[in-house]
Amino acid sequence: MTRPADGVDQPVPPPPPGVDVPAGDLPVGDSPADDSRADDSRDDSQADGARADGARADGARADGARAGQRGVPPARDLVFEIWLVLGVSLGASAVFAVINLVGRLTAPIPLKQSTATLNGSYAPTRPLLDLSLQLASITFQVVPAFLALHLLYRAGTTLAGIGLDRRRLPRDLAWGAGLAAAIGIPGLLLYLVAHAMGISATVVPEALPPVWWRIPVLVLSAAGNAVIEEIVVVGYLITRLEQLRWRPYQTLLASAVLRGSYHLYQGFGAFLGNAVMGLLFGYLFQRTRRVLPLIIAHTIIDTVTFVGYALLHGHVSWLP
């Protein structure tokens, strides 16, 4: 027989049959049952980890699928989008209006003696060319409004979501006519007072030649103004600012100030009057989520202004 080498652990033989050995006398881990349980525990842990990894992968795939669906863009993208839409539409008009007003204020003549023409002729001596240019101008004027609607739709806001459908057309027509009267009459009085005070330019609503298409073009121009302004400044801008978590009064003020600012080329009276109109229209949109009555009201106001001026100018003494 050989002796085991000193310091080297040798396997302990199992106890003889019928002899009880205390559990503490056996080395830990030498039990085959313990080894089996440890292996089972490791297998369970690995299985749990695999299931967790699978769940995370499924969640990532679900997030990716949701990202591919229509939804509100991230806040940073949303801000960039708003600036782009305004930059190709009424935001640009506001910048030019401010520059125009500065030019009027620094001119040698008083502000009230300057004129702001809203509908002028592109080719006074060539009626058909003039008509073509008028129609092209009105058409491309409203393109940013359709861009805004497209962007809203891609983010999940339908036409019905901003009240641009026919579900309540009779009621919308009634509301539009009432708003036109409520805004139009005080607006005319405000313009006359502002002009008398010297804080408004002389507004010339139309200066088209007396041709057969004069009135139809003025009506189309009024409708175009209503579409671009109410969709972009109210329906689009207020909706987007709400999605940015702006407070209701903040969205209302932003919309109203923008509306007033792109009318500054007419003077301070136009800024004030249109800002007040913006507050009213914006508030109504916040309450009803319907932009169609606002488009109807704006169309009526501008149509009466343009056509009324064409028919009355030179025949009444109170109209500048």
Image: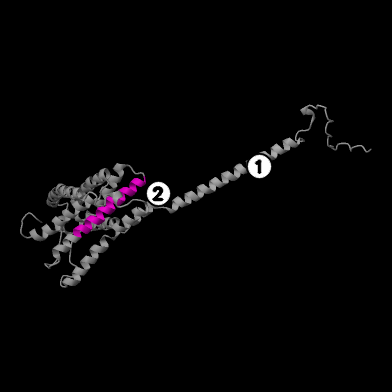
Magenta-tinted stretch: 221-244
Of pointers 2 and 1, the one earlier in the residue sequence: 1
Give the distance between the C-alpha atoms of the residues marked 2 and 1, in whole angstroms: 45 Å
For badge 2, the amino acid type reads Ala
Give the residue number, with chain letter if any, for mark 1.
43
Tell me, what colour scheme is on the image?
one colour
Q: Is residue 245 left or right of residue 142?
A: right
Query: Where is residue 309 shown, x and y percent of the image?
Result: 11, 58
Mark number displayed over residue 75: 2
Question: Magenta span has 182?
Answer: no
Q: Identify the residue shown where x is 24% and y is 66%.
A: 136
Q: Identify the residue shown where x is 76% and y is 33%.
A: 28
* Visible residue check, residue 184: yes
Q: Identify the residue shown where x is 69% and y is 40%.
A: 39
For badge 1, the amino acid type reads Asp
| Of residues 63 and 95, the one drawn nearer to the viewer in this rendering | 63
| Of residues 169 and 232, the one drawn nearer to the viewer in this rendering | 169
* Visible residue check, residue 207: no
Q: Quadrant of the N terminus?
A: top right
Q: Is the magenta region chiefly helix, strand or loop? A: helix
List the single residue furthest toward the bottom: 126
Q: Is residue 20 left or right of residue 48?
A: right
**Does 94 sit above or below residue 208?**
above
| Of residues 216 and 81, the one drawn nearer to the viewer in this rendering | 216
Query: Where is residue 191 shown, x and y percent of the image?
Result: 14, 51
List the single residue furthest toward the right: 1
At label 2, counting other C-alpha atoms closer than 10 Å, the crowd grade (few under 14, some 14-19, many 20 or more) is some
Q: Quadrant of residue 83?
A: bottom left
